[in-house]
Image: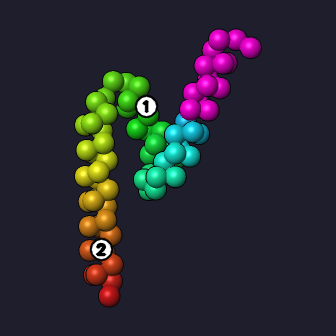
Amino acid sequence: MSDEKASIDNSQTVRKLVHAMSDVINTGLSYEALDVCMDLLDAGVSPMALANIVRIMSVEVKVQTELNNDSQV
């Protein structure tokens, strides 16, 4: 197996494990969202900054969902 193939296989394995851990701790993040987060971390984004942004966006989505539900009643 080439080094490139091994690297791709390892990356896919890591991503599957991260998604499984995310499910266990109930983050609510989709596979795609976790994939984007991992890409951002690989690109050098600060983990704390990313965590704060994800937290803020999660709260904002909940607020918007509640507002939409209230307006449909």
Amino acid type indicated by mark 1? Asp
Residue shown at 56% from the left, 46% from the top: 20
The Cα–Cα distance between marks 2 and 1, rounded to whole angstroms, is 30 Å
Residue carrying label 1 = 39
43 or 47, which lies in front?
47
Q: Is residue 49 left or right of residue 24?
A: left
Relative to 14, say whether 4 is above or below.
above
Label 2: element kind: helix
**Farthest-out residue, top:** 2
Tell me: 55 left or right of 1.
left
Q: Which residue is mark 2?
A: 66
The quarter holding residue 36 reads: top left
Q: Quadrant of the C terminus?
A: bottom left
Does residue 72 appear left or right of residue 10 in this picture?
left
Circle 1 packing at 10 Å, graded few (<14), some (14-19), many (20+), is few
Q: Tag 1 or tag 2, which sits nearer the N-term?
A: 1
Three-letter code, disc 2: Glu
Residue at the limit of the structure toward the right, as seen here: 1
> What x and y, as percent, mark residue 72?
33, 83
Point out residue 29 in the picture as x, y percentages from the top left corner.
44, 51
Tell me where residue 14 sits by quadrant.
Answer: top right
Q: Residue at point 57% right, 27% down? A: 11
First to last magenta residue range: 1-14
Q: Is residue 10 magenta?
A: yes
